[in-house]
Each structure stands twice: as C-alpha cells, then as structure tokens.
Amino acid sequence: MLIEGEDLVDGDEDPMETKNQGDLDTLHGTHVAGIIAANGKMKGVAPEAEIYAYRALGPGGAGDTDQVLKAIESAMKDKVDVLNLSLGNNVNGPDLPISLALNKAVESGIVAVTSNGNSGPAVWTVGSPGTAEKAISVGASTPPLRVPYMIYGLGSKKHQSHLTLFQGSKKWNLTFSENVIYGGLGNEKDLKDVRDKIVLMERGTLTFQQKVSNAEKAGAKG
C-alpha cells in the first residue's frame, strides 16, 4: 500500500515513474515495490507493508547524487523502518556521499538495503551505495546448474542457446537429444505435429500462458 511519496525529479508529491518518453520510460521502481508489497492477485514478500516512495531517478533511470541524498533524508524524516535503494554506480567507494548517507540512515535506526551492481565477479565491481559499511548489500549469484541447451545449424553456422523454463511450468525431463519443431505463434492450427517434441514459438498475438497451454494440449514435450 502506497502511504506517501515524493518526487525529487519533478519536485512534486507524485513519485510516478517516467512515462510516454519512449526508450526513456522507467518501471524498475514499480517492479521492486511490487516484489516487496504487492497485495492483489500476486503477493509480494511483505504484502501488508506500507510503501513510502521517493523518486530520485528520472528518464532512463538517470539522476544525480543530490536527488538520491534528498530521498535518503526524506526517508529518515519519515522514520521508515526499511530503506531500499535498487540503484548504483560504477565507483567502488565506501566514502562516497550516498554510501555515507546510508550509514547515517542505519545509525538513525533504519535498515538500509541496496543492490551491489551487475558488474561482477571481478574485484572492485561493487559500486556505491552497495559499498556502504552499514547497509545490507544484495547481489545475485549463479549456482552450478545443469541447464538444457540447443545446438542448431551446420559447420561454421553452429550456435548454442541455453533454454530455461517459463515460471510455474512443469519441470522438464530431458535427458539427451530431442526433436525440435517450429510452432509459429502457438495457435492450435500451428501445433498439428508437435507431440513429444520441443516447440519453438514466436512472441505475439497470444499470451505466453495461451501458447504453453496450446502446446501442452497438443502433446508437446517442452
């Protein structure tokens, strides 16, 4: 539930994402807020949480240090319990202003959580504010996995693509090589000869769920 907000980019009280600006439109803040506190058909990890939104980054996800510092100050003034910053830069600096500001927020009693960037795994690839001494810095990792893959083409034109499941779909039982067939857009009429085969379908017209359901009904293996 959105309780309060502040837009440090436009200077008003509506922290709406950037819209109607083509490639500069943003949605990351809304996405993260949904992961945290969605409370409709989809549930976040804390569906009863109260959201205070501070828009510090503008079109294209760009912004300046002053705006982020102001957002942190606003969160401290509002006495939030947890402060999340899903942002960063390419400077590995624990003494940068945003990192120091997060330390101050923690000292005031706030649990500060921030991303530590997507540039690893080499040294010095964690950027501020993930380098803040007192914040919880969160990164992604890729554990060893056996991932199905597809090899197609001949000779020098051979390519390899890793395959992943749709979220919520049944686990594959693939052991060695499988027959692959083109399934168009995933309409029922496109899936006449797919039984026990892997179906490749294009985006468009139907939802992913409809495409998958049609392929499953037709007997596809994946």
Image: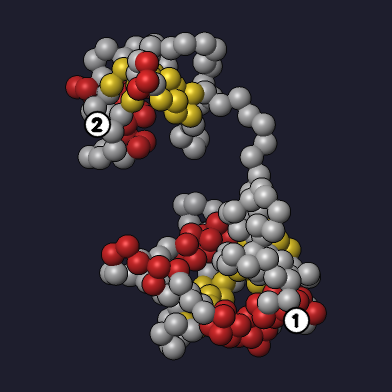
Question: What element does badge 1 sit on?
Answer: helix
- Residue 139: x and y, percent? 66, 53
Q: Nearer the viewer, mark 2 or mark 1?
A: 1
181 or 123, which lies in front? 123
Q: Which dot marks residue 185?
A: 2
**Which residue is at a point 32% across and 62% down the rendered structure image?**
23
**Is any part of residue 88 visible from this angle?**
no
120 or 49, which lies in front? 120
Label 2–label 1 contact, CB within 8 A? no
Question: What element does badge 2 sit on?
Answer: loop
Query: Which amino acid, mark 2?
Result: Leu
Which image quadrant: the C terminus?
top left
**Which residue is at a point 35% across and 22% down the rendered structure image?**
157
119 or 78, which lies in front? 119
Query: Which amino acid, mark 1?
Result: Lys
Q: Quadrant of residue 101?
A: bottom right
**Is any part of residue 62 visible from this angle?**
yes
95 or 193, which lies in front? 95
Q: Which residue is mark 1?
A: 104
